[in-house]
Structure formats: structure tokens, C-alpha cells
Amino acid sequence: MLQQSDNILPSDGLTDEPAVLALDGVTKTFPGVKALSEVSLSLVPGKVTALVGENGAGKSTVVKILTGIYQPDGGKILVNGQPTSFPVPQAAANNGVTAIHQETVLFDELSVAENIFLGHAPRGALGLIDLKVMAERSREILEGIGASIDPDHKLKDLGIANKHLVAIARALSIDARVVIMDEPTAALSHKEIEELYELVENLKAQGKAILFISHKFDEIFRIADNYTVFRDGQLIGDGAIVDVTEADLVKMMVGRDVSQIFPPRTSDPGDVVLKVQGYAHPTEFEDIGFTLRKGELLGFYGLVGAGRSEFMQSLFGITRSSAGTVEIDGAPVHIKSPADAVENGIVYVPEDRGKQGAILDLPIFQNITLPSLGRISGKGFLKLAEEFKLAREYTERLDLRAASLDTHVGNLSGGNQQKVVIAKWLATQPKVIILDEPTKGVDIGSKAAVHEFMAELAAQGLAIIMVSSEIPEVLGMSDRVIVMREGRMVAELAEGDLQPETLVRHAAGI
């Protein structure tokens, strides 16, 4: 096992076989964030390399560099040992690199064959698409991965599992030498996951080099030959999977001190403000129950597919629950819509602020006052002075940086957009605020500002639920943590039990 030292040497491959694709000392920087710092990675024919790391470790950035979406700021991309570049995604495809993403875009109204060869369909002598050849090649690819799907069928007529196989066939249609699988099992059933494992073994037998990205340790130890661990954009360790244990990987993933990153907090929770019992949804989660006190910050942690966001959206009335009760200040409430939730003092700041949290084409002040129009209106007319006053109060509280309150939210940085969404809901004077991935996609400075403000809100008595996939954030901000896995609560941890390894073990079912 190779551990990080002060000077990490580029990996020359983890076996005697030369790497078909490698990164050597690659660096990538975005404004305010160094996503990758001199990282190295080797992908060997006929081997599966698991890329392991928590959210923000740099895994997605590596995938985008390997597929030509991002360009490295430093270091080398090596194909068969020779330096090369992928200035556009097509260049990566031309070098035999393909990716199977968790959510691949397919087109329901096109045929299976048209989806597989979209953008690179075989053409005849006159330059027209050769439908017969396209269907024949599609059938060959589908049979090669064990899929008995008619290439002429419309995609919309297929089930979810077969659509996933079409996405895989599409990725393999370029005769790939390197296959990147990014969380490929997140939306699959147990049976479909087993079929995917068989496909991986098939690809290995064909000599494909596979990069496998997953949070699930059972998957990693089931199919990986080698591992590479990233943390905070740095290479922490790599080697053969047989040389490490789950505990080794966990320590490499989360080994950091969070005590000086987050604002100091003294927790002094008050009375119970929210009580949830037996809460369930027909397909997403079941038997959720907990209490939340005034001034308390309750963290929810889990891996992809754990059901955390789905539960929060149901608690806010976006989706309907099938069972369970909710009490606010000891009184039962029935939440059938977001309006019901807001009226009862529950607000929700979603993970996708661009699509669900803000209207990007509207100015700051109108976004902030949107849920509070009843308070700033009289006799059917909006009081503009009151609207600006309310917006100004909450933008100042959050130290939102913008030229004016007329600035469109779409023109703000990610961190300031997040502040707008938080300000919008704080203006409703809630009792409980749910923050779903509150610092996702924001720079370091904005993260610190959001954390400071969260600490201030808790100190003022607001009850906070924070959903986060970032272990340091969960540990650094939470008074208690509920861990979810596959739609169920599997642990509730208080301060003495809040350790990185403990969170990961519960979340991964170790």
C-alpha cells in the first residue's frame, strides 16, 4: 500500500503491465478551489481500478479530465505511455475512452440503435446513415453485454434496467479501451447489480481497463483489482485491493482534523420543536423517527441512494408520505404541500438551488420576498418599500455580496445564490429549516460564511436539519447525526460517537 508523503511520486502502474491510460502529476484549479493537486492514476488493461474518496475529493474532476470535458492546468495525460491531450470529448472517444454515468441522457422517442449510435452513426457511400449496419452493430454490442433487446424498439418501450443496458451499449459503441463507471449501481435493483458485475467481468476478459467509482465498499471489494484513494484533491494511496482492508480505505478517505475548519459552537438545545414518528414513503424510505430541539443542529448522513433528500422533500410536502406522524411544538400537523409546511414553520433549502431553490432570471429582492408576499401586501397591492426593506434585512444578515438588490440571481456566485435561497426562507420566520447539501458547489470562503451563519441561527434558537455528504461538514457542524442507508435510519450518533470511521461504517453497512 502506498501512503501519501511530502513528495508523491507518479504511479507507474500497479502491475507489470503498462497502463493504457494514466495521469501523471495532474493539477486542476477553479476559482477559490484547488480541485486536484499533482495527482496520478494508472488504468491497466483487464483490471478494475476503484477510485475512492468522499464528496469533494476530486473524483468527478478526474472523470471530466479523462473524458475531455476539463483540461488539466498541469501534469500529463498518458496514452500507452505517450503524452497526449483531450481538448474536446471527441478526442477522448477517439482514444478509446468512454464513460457510463449514473444518469446518462437517452432519448425516449428514438430507437435503441439510434440511441446507441447517436452522434457517430455508420454512414453509407452517399453520407447517409446506414440503418441496416447500425442495427446490426447495435445487436452485436447488446449481445456482447448479454442484453436481448431489439435494436429497432423505441427506447420508451423499455424498462429502467434495459434502458441502463442501452446506456452501457452506447458507451461501448466507440470500441472503448477504457471504460469509466461512475456510481453505475445507484439506480439499480439487486438483480440488476449482479448483472452489472457479470458485465464488468466480461469487459475485463475483453482486456478493457475499467475505472470504477463507488461509495459502496462491498462493490469495491467484489470487483476491483486495484484501488486509488483521493482526499481533498490529493493522492493519498494506491495499490492492490488484496493488500488493504475496509478500515484502511476508510482511514485514507477521512483522515483529517476538522476541529479548526468550522466555527466553534456550544450546544444548548431547548424544547422539542419537531417530532417525527413512523414516517414512510411507498418506495423511497420507511420508519423514520426522531426529535429535533430549538437551537439544535441535526445532521443527516448517508451515501448515494440512502433516501435522505427524498425524506426531506416529503417532510416539506413536495411528495406525499404513506404513513407516520409529524408534530410541531407538541401539536400534530398534516403536511400535504409546501404551503402547509411553510405555514407550520418548516422550510426547505434544496440541494439544486438553480432549479428548485431560486428563480435565476428574477432579481435578488423578488426571490427573497416570494414566500412572504402576504406580509408585504395590502388590499391586493404589493408594497414595494416593504419588499425592499425585507430583502435588505436578510441580505445584510447573510452578508450577501451583490451590486444591488436588483441584480439577477443568475449573475451571482454559487455561494451568494445559496445565501439568497436561505434568506428567502428565513424571511418567513420558520421554526425548522432543512438545509440539503448547504455548501455544495460553493467556494471555500462562501462555505465558511454559510457555516458561520448556520452557527448563528442555531444560537438564536432555530432548529436546523442539515443533509450533507461531506464528512467534515457533518462532524464539524452537527450536535447529533442520523445515518441513513437504503431508505432506513441505521444509526443515531451523539457527540461522543461522532467519528469519521463510524459514519462511513454505518452508511456503507460495514
Image: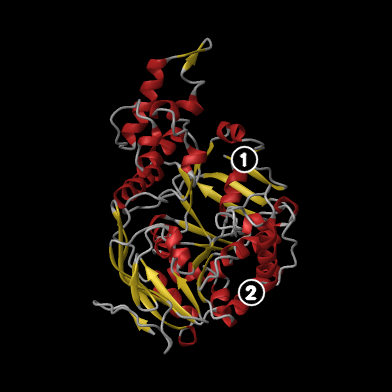
First of labels 1, 2 by sequence position:
2
409 left or right of 111 in image? left
Residue name at image x 43 percent, y 87 percent: 17
Q: Which residue is mark 1?
A: 318
**Relative to the observer, which residue lies in front, 180 or 428?**
180
Number of residues whose C-alpha sits closer than 10 Å to that of mark 2, classed few (under 14), some (14–19) or many (20 or more): some
Q: Position of residue 170 (x, y in %)?
A: 60, 62
Residue name at image x 35 percent, y 52 percent: 265
The quarter of the picture where the N terminus appears is bottom left
Going by the numbered disc 1, the residue's amino acid type is Ile
**Relative to the observer, which residue lies in front, 117 or 203?**
117
475 left or right of 350 in image? left
Image quadrant in which you'd find residue 228: bottom left
**Relative to the observer, which residue lies in front, 382 or 129?**
129
Closer to the camera: disc 1 or disc 2? 2
153 left or right of 271 in image? right
377 lies above or below 411: above
Number of residues whose C-alpha sits closer than 10 Å to that of mark 1, classed few (under 14), some (14–19) or many (20 or more): some
Q: CA distance from mark 1 to mark 2?
A: 37 Å
Going by the numbered disc 2, the residue's amino acid type is Leu
390 lies above or below 52: above
Labelled disc at residue 199: 2
Residue 489 seen anywhere in this rendered image of the structure:
no
Q: Position of residue 164 (x, y in %)?
A: 65, 61
**Relative to the observer, which residue lies in front, 35 or 372?**
35
Residue 266 seen anywhere in this rendered image of the structure:
yes
312 left or right of 425 in image? right
Question: Helix or strand or loop: what does disc 2 sit on?
Answer: helix
Q: Position of residue 39 (x, y in %)?
A: 33, 71
